[in-house]
Image (cartoon, rainbow, N blue to C red):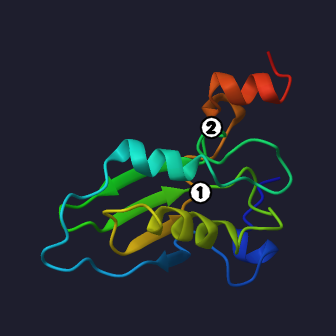
Amino acid sequence: MQDDRTLSDFMPGVAEGFKATAGAPLAADHGPVAAEEQIIDALREVYDPEIPVNLYDLGLIYNINIIPDGTVNIDMSLTAPGCPVAGEMPGDVARAVAKVPGTGEVTVTLVWEPPWTPERMSEDARLALGMI
């Protein structure tokens, strides 16, 4: 039997393409734009409240796009479509990244393709969860 349900069937209003934003455009004389390493460091400060591993090492961050004007676009997923914090996590990510000097507006988009699997986790995450 095929399950044709979508995230909105589990969490009304939180579906693929759900976006959260934080920050504001940088001034024209903004100075250097944040480096990807700085963005990753900020992402490592955001944790799923049910799992003691940060979202980056869990493999939930699929794409980081830093535009020369300081705009940052991030695609992220969650461990499961029915995740009870589905509506909160993109906002948490956007706010954490917006605190990084050299970032302007940050947009985080929730995606479900490709589906998250434990193979996306870093070795540190697997170790923390007793998977290796």
- Name the one closer to the observer, 44 or 4: 44
Residue count near mark 1 (Cα–Cα under 10 Å), binned few <14, some 14–19, many ≥20:
some
What whole-number distance in Å separates the C-alpha atoms at marks 2 and 1? 18 Å
The residue wearing badge 1 is: 112
In the image, 9: left or right of 130?
Answer: left
- Name the one closer to the observer, 123 or 103: 103
Nearer the camera: disc 2 or disc 1: 2
Q: Amino acid at mark 2?
A: Asp
Residue count near mark 2 (Cα–Cα under 10 Å), binned few <14, some 14–19, many ≥20:
some
Question: Circle 2 sits in a helix, a strand or a loop, which is it?
Answer: loop
Residue 75, given in percent of the width and then of the height, sits at 47, 58
The residue wearing badge 2 is: 57
Contact (CB < 8 A) between labels 2 and 1? no
Residue 59, given in percent of the width and then of the height, sits at 60, 40
Residue 125, given in percent of the width and then of the height, sits at 71, 30
- Name the one closer to the observer, 53 or 86: 53
| Mark earlier in primary sequence (2, 1) | 2
